[in-house]
Image (cartoon, grey):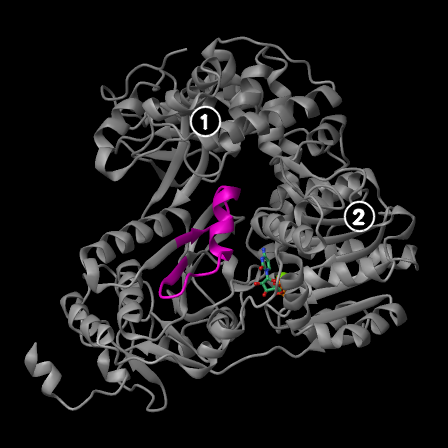
Amino acid sequence: KKNKNKKPEPSEHEKWEKYKIGSATMRFGSRDQQHPDQNEKQYELIVEDEIEFIAEDILKGKMELPEELKKLESTSSTANNEQEDIEKTRKSLPIYPHRERLMKMIADNQVLVIVGETGSGKTTQLTQYLYEDGYTKNNLKIACTQPRRVAAMSVAARVAQEMGVTLGDKVGYSIRFEDCTSPQTIIKYMTDGMMLREFLGEPDLSSYSVIIVDEAHERSLHTDILFGLVKDIAIARPDVKLLISSATIQAEKFSEYFDGAPIINIPGRRYPVDILYTKAPEADYLEASVITVLQVHFTQPQGDILVFLTGQEEIETACDMLRDRVKGFGQKAKELIVTPIYATLPTEMQAEIFKKTPPGARKVVLATNIAETSLTIDGIVYVIDCGFVKQNSYNPRSGMESLLVTPISRASADQRAGRAGRVSPGKCFRLYTSWSYKNELLSAPVPEIQRVNLGNVVLQLKTLGINDLIHFDFMDPPPVETLIAALEQLYALGALNDGGDLTVMGRKMAAFPLDPQMSKMLIASEGYGCSEEVASLCAMLNVNGSVFHRPKERAVHADNARKNFFRPGGDHLMLLAVYKECEENGFDKSWCMQSYVQVKSMKRARDVRNQLIKLMENEGVELKTNNDPALIRKAITAGYFFHAASLQKSGNYRTFHKPQTVYVHPSSSTYQTQARWVIYHELVFTNKEFMRQIIEIEPAWLIDIAPHLYRNTDIEKLTHKMPKNKGRATMA
Ligand code: CDP
Ligand code: MG
């Protein structure tokens, strides 16, 4: 230890000492690392023990605050009250000095592309400027779309606060299964998916004076569809204003698409960001990001940290790891406030990330891609970028849809790095090599429309009377195969007739904000006399994340509690059992705790169910109750017959439609049962193609429900391929 201190003061980059992590397989960055670019800065992860020594240096006061941060600390919050403070903040945003020019351009042009750095104030200020300039006269509304639900909620809350009004009154938001608006609402934030639904009720959107398509650069599926629809609206309604708002990428493309609409650039305040790469590829980016957080915490001057990871589970794990390790340092560590943010984080916890960090402490926000451009967190000086994102991917040939952890694009990497330079010069630690950045990352992300199943969107477009999908004005068209696969699926579900026109069933299905298969299951359940049960099931399947609570230290108890809910027949019946029991116990918190069930998820399921019941009443789907597991499983089959799989001799399964090998997820209640025929709710790819939420079915139901797909001879052939003794007889 003493030796270390005797060495000449190491340069900052030299402080990162060598550390080797795990030996798991690399996912990218595995190729040539021999010729690092001399201009690129690199860093290495430190040995954890050594952090302690460095920590002592800091305690001895060797690290100084940079000037910009000192200034920031002294200027903040000199205002007398909250409203004054808010006014000050609003005026300090980069968009503010451009207000007049911006509003004039809006007045002079019907369509305008607005480009500005993330955090410049586009999302929170534009709507207010429009409101203040009278665009909401005569009760007309301003719509602002967001690709992410959390962003819609959080931004609406912020704007309501800035305007000093109650959320849900003048300013509200609308996301799937949650409508926080009222007849007084004139500024409405909503997910792009909900905006698409607005067209169903009001094809010309006549109650809106302005439509802001925000976060356009994200190119989410629904945003891309919206582009085509609002472009039409603009022609039909010369009075409507259309604003396309985007981070600093792709502006030209938007302008071109909207017939040369002018572009206004809001120059952002952007401090330089020092980018550091790892010397060698990291095998375990989760561990690597945790270590890097600690390194920054112990060796870098004040400033909050933003870490980009890929999903909820990973983020929660990293949070636990960080809290644990910092605790281990005891007095030597300054306070580290660890906060997660991801799409399904309960609302009351989302506010945490926006809270000001108390002096002397440091905040670390562990986020999904949501913090890349949709949410701005003030005070971030350090960004740690794992280089991955969780993305949908769909293969129309196999019909396989999966969420995959995928390398990000260079554009994304740059956006992420930019988050470090908003308040002062910052640093971005990339957990990949500069070689990977240059040679392995795509330059821009692939638009979602080109990598997802389009069943839902095609059904909605058909409902809007858009029949010729091949010639729809897509900014980037989806693969024709994907469109055809969607049409085939809708036809098989009975939503389209053989002329490709919408059927009565199709129209009914479109009324539910669910995937076509789930809509079909719900509507069909009326015929099986169990629509009450299937509504509960839909609600449970729509509660994102797990309904079960599994704390690490009590994993065995949690698993046992979960096993109590197992029901013969499979996972859907288990979910239903959880819902029923929870309902019987009045969604009681202590019951949930004892049962290792998340009370928040359950309450959300209850809300979703209530919404579905209302829609069912509107659509004339009769509410009937019947607990017979066979009937419930038949109703599931009626929607999900595409997802049938049969047992193989190997003990694994093979899907029937577009055959491929799939596996039972170890968390499934059917993991040991070797059921012969099953239907799965979804396929997830981690290291294998896993079926998740599985029920056992009778093959006869498939022939009965979808005779166009399943024939007796095929079923018999497959039955011969099943293990002779292993598979137990199916139950019905
Ligand atoms: O849309 P854009 O990225 O241009 O910026 P914005 O989202 O309007 O953010 C402007 C400012 O509002 C930033 O300083 C954010 O930190 C702040 N904000 C906030 O404090 N709370 C929110 N829920 C959203 C934004
Ligand atoms: Mg924004």
| 656 or 486: nearer the viewer | 486
The boundaries of the magenta stretch are 339-365
Q: Dot 1 corresponds to which residue?
A: 714
Q: Where in the figure is residue 374, as x and y percent of width and height? A: 57, 59
Q: CA distance from mark 2 to mark 1?
A: 57 Å
Type of amino acid under label 2: Ile
In the rendered image, the vertical position of residue 125 relative to residue 616, given as above or below:
below
248 magenta-colored: no
Q: Is residue 482 left or right of residue 385?
A: right
Q: Nearer the viewer, residue 627 or 57?
A: 57
Q: Give the labeled residue for mark 2.
A: 186
Q: Quadrant of residue 40?
A: bottom left
At which x and y percent is residue 638? 56, 23
Q: Nearer the viewer's eye, disc 2 or disc 1?
A: 2
Q: Residue at x 69, y 44 (%)?
A: 166
Q: Amino acid at mark 1?
A: Asp
Q: Is residue 708 something that shows in the picture?
A: no
As drawn, 707 above or below 631: below
Q: Is residue 520 above or below residue 60?
A: above
Helix, strand or loop for disc 1: helix
Crowd tier of the residue under label 1, counting other residues whose Cα lies within 10 Å: few below 14, some 14–19, many 20 or above: few
Q: Position of residue 277 (x, y in %)?
A: 34, 77
63 and 425: which is toward the camera: 63
